[in-house]
């Protein structure tokens, strides 16, 4: 989403995305006084332009994110800390820290940025490809199936330019507990939001956003947040201001 769309959506107004919304657009602005010529406003053209500007997500895009998830699980499935939450946080950091297109919609949920549909898709594709099976009641959540490791060829093809960065990121979080990576991913998301809003970054604003994320975040103290931020700076895992 571009900056104009993001701003409009943040104010409760987005570009029309259906014929019903186009009709509502006309009704809403019928009584407004425009300095510009209202006859030159064409909501249908806005709709078509917005659709053209959105890259269509293909089956290959979905396969690429499944392959990335498979590599993370392949390296970490013996770690008891690896479950749905940790896997998602690692994918969130791949998307946002390494600048990778995961095509996931990470929402504000109690455990931090999380996309439920992404997780269902990955577990389903894992089983279909006979790579891994998720076992909720087990200490080891992901169990290798007959074709475990079969993703490797695809992984090296899709991510040949990111192999070192991905492996480094996985290695950094190999022994990290779920609660710790939840803390880091939530800080990252809040930090990113501050930059996207054009605000000057400071710890007080980050603390405010962090605790407003969900009541669940009260389990973390301000000192824990500050230590995590220092660690993120040391490791180079933090968002940067997008260039204009």
Image (spheres, rainbow, N blue to C red):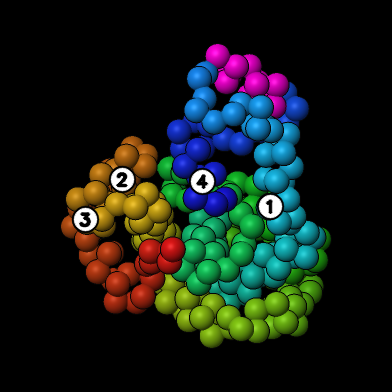
Q: Secondary structure at mark 2?
A: helix
Nearer to us: label 1 or label 2:
1
Q: Secondary structure at mark 1?
A: loop
- Residue 25 in the image, given as x and y percentages of width and height: 63, 24
Nearer to us: label 1 or label 3:
1
CA gap, disc 1 and disc 2? 29 Å
Between residue 215 and residue 39, name the one nearer to us: 39
Residue located 53% across and 69% down the image: 99
Nearer to us: label 3 or label 4:
4
Mark 3 vs 4, N-terminal side: 4
Residue 124 on the magenta span: no
- Residue 103 in the image, given as x and y percentages of width and height: 64, 57
Between residue 136 and residue 28, name the one nearer to us: 28
Mark 1 vs 2, N-terminal side: 1
Q: Is residue 50 visible?
A: yes
CA gap, disc 1 and disc 3? 35 Å
Residue 60 placement: quadrant: bottom right
- Residue at numbered disc 1: 54
- Residue 190 in the image, given as x and y percentages of width and height: 36, 52
CA gap, disc 3 and disc 4? 27 Å
- Residue at numbered disc 3: 203
Mark 3 vs 2, N-terminal side: 3
Q: Secondary structure at mark 4?
A: helix
Q: Which mark is residue 4?
A: 4
Residue 30 on the magenta span: yes
Image quarter hosting the C terminus: bottom left
- Residue at numbered disc 2: 209
Which stretch is magenta? 21-31
Q: Residues within 10 Å of mark 1 (few under 14, many from 20)?
A: few
Residue located 67% across and 65% down the image: 65
């Amino acid at each position: 989403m571009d900056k104009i769309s993001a701003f409009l959506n943040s104010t409760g107004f987005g570009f029309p995305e259906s014929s019903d919304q186009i009709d509502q657009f006309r009704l809403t602005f019928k009584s407004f006084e425009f300095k510009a010529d209202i006859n030159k406003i064409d909501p249908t053209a806005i709709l078509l332009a917005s659709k053209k500007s959105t890259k269509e997500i293909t089956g290959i895009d979905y396969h690429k994110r499944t392959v990335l998830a498979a590599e993370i699980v392949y390296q970490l499935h013996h770690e008891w800390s690896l479950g749905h939450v940790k896997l998602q946080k690692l994918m969130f950091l791949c998307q946002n820290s390494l600048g990778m297109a995961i095509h996931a919609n990470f929402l504000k949920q109690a455990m931090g940025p999380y996309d439920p549909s992404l997780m269902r898709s990955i577990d389903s594709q894992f089983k279909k490809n006979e790579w891994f099976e998720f076992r909720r009641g087990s200490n080891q959540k992901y169990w290798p199936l007959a074709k475990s490791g079969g993703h490797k060829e695809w992984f090296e093809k899709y991510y040949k330019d990111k192999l070192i960065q991905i492996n480094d990121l996985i290695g950094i979080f190999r022994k990290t507990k779920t609660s710790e990576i939840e803390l880091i991913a939530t800080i990252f998301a809040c930090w990113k939001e501050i930059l996207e809003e054009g605000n000057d970054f400071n710890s007080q604003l980050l603390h405010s956003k962090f605790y407003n994320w969900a009541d669940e975040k009260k389990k973390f103290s301000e000192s824990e947040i500050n230590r995590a931020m220092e660690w993120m700076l040391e490791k180079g895992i933090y968002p940067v201001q997008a260039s204009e």
